[in-house]
Amino acid sequence: TGELTIKDVTRPLSIDLEFNGSATDVYGNERVGFEGSAEILRSDWGLTWNAALEAGGVMVSDKVKLTFDISAIKQA
């Protein structure tokens, strides 16, 4: 859980992360991996721009899925 700021609007955000394991990389660093995602509503951050499509509907959904693929190394 933390905060996400978009265009000067800050709101809390929780991200469900899954630990994918750890290993020593080719440089001898201890590396860990995580994957996760969260869904936000653009309107919660004041993002209201959109455009109508000729076939109906809108160009950008209010609901946006953020996905994360994280690789991190332990600092010495």
Image: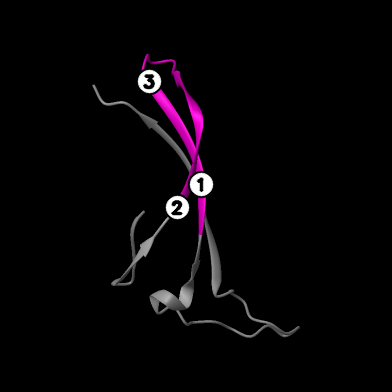
Q: Are marks 2 and 1 in contact (CB under 8 Å)?
A: yes
Q: Quadrant of the C terminus?
A: top left
Mark nearest the camera among 3 and 2 is 2
Q: Which residue is tagged 2?
A: 15
The residues colored magenta run 16-38
Vertical side of 56 occupied by 62: above or below: above
| Residue 2 on the magenta segment | no
Q: Position of residue 2 (x, y in %)?
A: 33, 56
Magenta residues, dominant SS class: strand
In which quadrant of the rendered view does residue 59 lie?
Answer: bottom right
* Residue at 37% in and 14% down: 28
Residue 36, labelled with which disc? Answer: 1
* Residue at 36% in and 53% down: 1
Q: Position of residue 31 (x, y in %)?
A: 41, 25
Q: Position of residue 67 (x, y in %)?
A: 52, 51
Mark nearest the camera among 1 and 3 is 1
* Residue at 44% in and 15% down: 26
The 10 Å Cα crowd at callout 1, few under 14, some 14 to 19, many 20 or more, is some
| Residue 37 on the magenta segment | yes
Q: Which residue is tagged 3?
A: 30
The Cα–Cα distance between marks 2 and 1, rounded to whole angstroms, is 6 Å
The 10 Å Cα crowd at callout 2, few under 14, some 14 to 19, many 20 or more, is some
Colour scheme used in the picture? one colour
**Element marked by disc 3:** strand
Three-letter amino acid code of the residue under disc 3: Glu
The Cα–Cα distance between marks 1 and 3, rounded to whole angstroms, is 21 Å
The answer to which of marks 2 and 1 sits earlier in the sequence is 2
